[in-house]
């Protein structure tokens, strides 16, 4: 059973539905004790870093998430759920993250010269596998995934990057550090390729 963390911010229904289509049993959890007792966890997210981390701390979910990740059980962060895993974020100020993966979350600067690309980055982009890892198994190099984000993660250890994508320069599209995995793209919105990602996670 996969537990999807509900902290009032995120696209829970689409993640839950995508897991069902991938043949995985899932439930939505709202209590820190439920998080700690789960077999597998997904931390989804759409929204702002400061609001999300404040809500997680106020509810006691932040500590539960950190405890779960330390227990060595499969963990998946999606989009904002990936960004919250690092030490610090710079959206609307400077905010401490969960500190599960060393690094920072910074805004794209590709809307400045010489690139002049739109921010947020929105649309389909190809993956370039780095470390790869179990989450990306059975996917071809260059598989396309769907992204919607203005910020991206810069891990302290580039060895934690499972895949990169390019938007005015390479950025971390997926992370893998032991039992903790994360995607900046939305597997639940990435059609067949995204379903493979969720099937891989369900099999862990």
Image (spheres, rainbow, N blue to C red):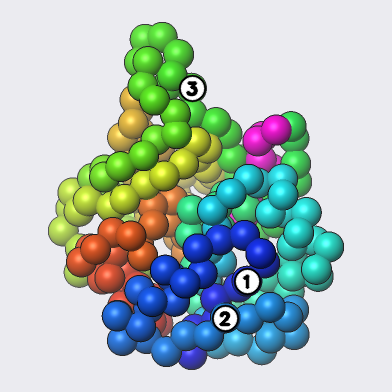
Disc 1 marks which residue? 6
Left or right position of 201 against 82: left
Label 1, label 3: how far apart the Cα atoms are: 31 Å
Q: In the image, is residue 107 above or below residue 188?
A: above
Q: Position of residue 181 (x, y in %)?
A: 47, 64
The answer to whether marks 2 and 1 mark residues whose Cβ atoms lie closer than 8 Å is yes
Front residue of this view, candidates 103 and 95: 95
Q: Residue at x 73, y 74 (%)?
A: 64
Label 3, label 2: how far apart the Cα atoms are: 35 Å
Label 2, label 1: how far apart the Cα atoms are: 6 Å
Does residue 154 appear in the picture of this structure? Answer: no
N-terminal of the two: label 2 or label 1? Answer: 1
Q: Position of residue 78 (x, y in %)?
A: 48, 59
Disc 2 marks which residue? 28
Does residue 147 appear in the picture of this structure? Answer: yes
N-terminal of the two: label 3 or label 2? Answer: 2
State the SS at label 1. loop
* Quadrant assignment, res 3: bottom right
Q: Residue at x 35, y 74 (%)?
A: 18
State the SS at label 2. strand
Residue 186 among those drawn in magenta: no
Q: Quadrant of the C terminus?
A: bottom left
Q: Which stretch is magenta?
A: 85-92
Disc 3 marks which residue? 109
Q: Position of residue 165 (x, y in %)?
A: 32, 41
N-terminal of the two: label 1 or label 3? Answer: 1
Left or right position of 163 against 99: left
Q: Position of residue 137 (x, y in %)?
A: 26, 68
* Quadrant assignment, res 50: top right
Front residue of this view, candidates 178 and 68: 68
State the SS at label 3. loop
Q: Residue at x 20, y 53 (%)?
A: 143
């Amino acid at each position: 059973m996969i537990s999807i963390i509900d902290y009032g911010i995120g696209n829970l229904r689409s993640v839950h539905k995508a897991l069902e289509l991938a043949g995985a049993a899932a439930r939505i959890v709202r209590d820190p004790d439920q998080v700690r007792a789960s077999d597998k966890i997904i931390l989804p997210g759409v929204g702002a870093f400061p609001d999300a981390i404040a809500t997680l701390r106020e509810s006691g979910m932040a500590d539960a998430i950190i405890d779960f990740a330390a227990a060595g059980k499969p963990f998946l962060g999606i989009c904002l759920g990936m960004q919250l895993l690092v030490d610090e974020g710079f959206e609307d100020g400077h905010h401490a993250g969960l500190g599960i993966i060393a690094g920072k979350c910074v805004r794209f600067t590709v809307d400045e010269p010489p690139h002049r690309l739109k921010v947020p980055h929105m649309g389909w982009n190809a993956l370039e596998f780095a470390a790869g890892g179990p989450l990306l198994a059975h996917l071809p190099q260059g598989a396309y995934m769907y992204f919607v984000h203005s910020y991206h993660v810069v891990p302290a250890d580039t060895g934690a990057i499972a895949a990169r994508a390019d938007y005015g320069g390479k950025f971390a599209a997926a992370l893998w550090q032991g039992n903790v995995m994360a995607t900046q793209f939305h597997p639940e919105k990435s059609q067949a390729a995204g379903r493979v990602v969720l099937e891989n996670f369900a099999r862990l």
